[in-house]
Image (cartoon, rainbow, N blue to C red):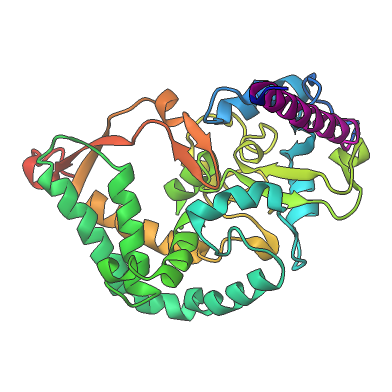
Amino acid sequence: MSAVATLCVIVAGAAAVLFAAAGYLWASRLRTGVPGPPTLPILGNLLFFRKLPVVYEHCNKLQRLYGNVYRFYIGPVLIVVVTEAEDAQKLLAGTKLRDRGSYLMRPLRPFLGNGLITNSGETWKSQRKLIEPCFHSEVLKGFSDAYNEGAQYICDYLKRAGGCQVQLYEPLCLLSMRTLAASVFGLPFEEMVQDQDTRDKVTTAFMEGLRIIQETLRLYPPVPNASVVLSEDTPLAGGRYVAPRGAYVLVALHLLHRQPDVFPDPEKFDPSRFLENGGPARSPYAYLPFGAGARKCVGARFAMLEIKTVLAAVLRQFRVLPGCTRRQLDQVGISTTGVPLNDFKVTCIPRTDLPASQAK
């Protein structure tokens, strides 16, 4: 037998083994009565997500077709998506550390490092214990200089634009990194990024980073999904369905925040929803921009203080005009955080350049 023929036999044999293994995994996959799209053998629903990146609209379409609890398969892996407060509370509440599963987290390690987002178990606990005191409310009070320096950084960027349209995503990312470096870690930004261990912690805090702010976070939560790997069979949707032990469950926060029975006319931007007595009483698990439970974003209070400081500084100095449509804003890719497919574009006109009647 020639070398070419031998190689062909080896390749064919390896392909047959891989196909048999894939077939076995598919045949032994977890099953559930939760509704979802038709599957293909071995591939599951991969073709539904063939156009990357996966965006909000993919999840929205599945919710419209199959309801507030639905499932899909990535190969043989069962993923159940929930979008209601009752299920969010059941899955996320309490101090019990819930496993996120290696299937979703392992691919993120090369990008996010070995930090809070990607770790679990005792490693996660030790890291959380180490970093949590940095975000205590008493400690945050001492970060005002760092917040103000960050606000000045973005205002200087906007001034240099001279009233022309600018893109905000990259400078806002740099703003967050600079503020974290100067406040939590007490380092200049340029020095911080050279240290690998510190960089992992900063990247984790950054990736996680009243009124108008709360409504913005409702429509565009920083983290679109909270993932859980079930350690036991779990009833969902008031007991109508059961997700089996070992399934991945995603609490889709961007869909949770758009439930019409909780937030009427959910696509409308309406900050009055969060005024005191501004709407009907809602479950505390109906609005979770930073997650909930043991894995709630450790930097939530830090992020809110930074947002308030920067927003106040910008609005004090500039009149902000939109440079993109709502449809463009809704083009958000789903990853560890929501990633805009179109950059945020605005025109910021210095108030000193405006007529007195428009400067206020």
- Horizontal side of 69 relative to 179 (left or right) equals right
Name the quarter where the C terminus is drawn.
top left
Q: Would you say residue 8 sits in the magenta stretch? A: yes
Residue at 81% x, 53% y is: 90
- Start and end of the magenta stretch? 4-30
Q: Identify which residue, 123 or 56, lies in the foreground.
A: 123
Q: Identify which residue, 308 or 159, lies in the foreground.
A: 159
Examine the residues drawn in magenta and state their main secondary structure: helix
Q: Would you say residue 50 sits in the magenta stretch? A: no
Query: In the rendered image, which quarter is residue 357 located in?
Result: top left
Query: In the rendered image, which quarter is residue 295 located in?
Result: bottom right
- Horizontal side of 26 relative to 209 (left or right) equals right
Q: Work out whether 220 lies above or below 323.
A: below
Q: Where does residue 315 sit, x and y in percent of width and height? A: 25, 49
Judge whether residue 118 can be spotted in this image.
yes
Q: Work out whether 174 lies above or below 74.
A: below
Q: Where does residue 308 sit, x and y in percent of width and height? A: 37, 58
Q: Identify which residue, 190 or 43, lies in the foreground.
A: 43
Number of labels in the image equals: 0
Judge whether residue 44 can be spotted in this image.
no
Q: Where does residue 182 sit, x and y in percent of width and height? A: 31, 72
Name the quarter where the N terminus is drawn.
top right
Residue at 62% x, 25% y is: 49
Q: Work out whether 206 lies above or below 258.
A: below
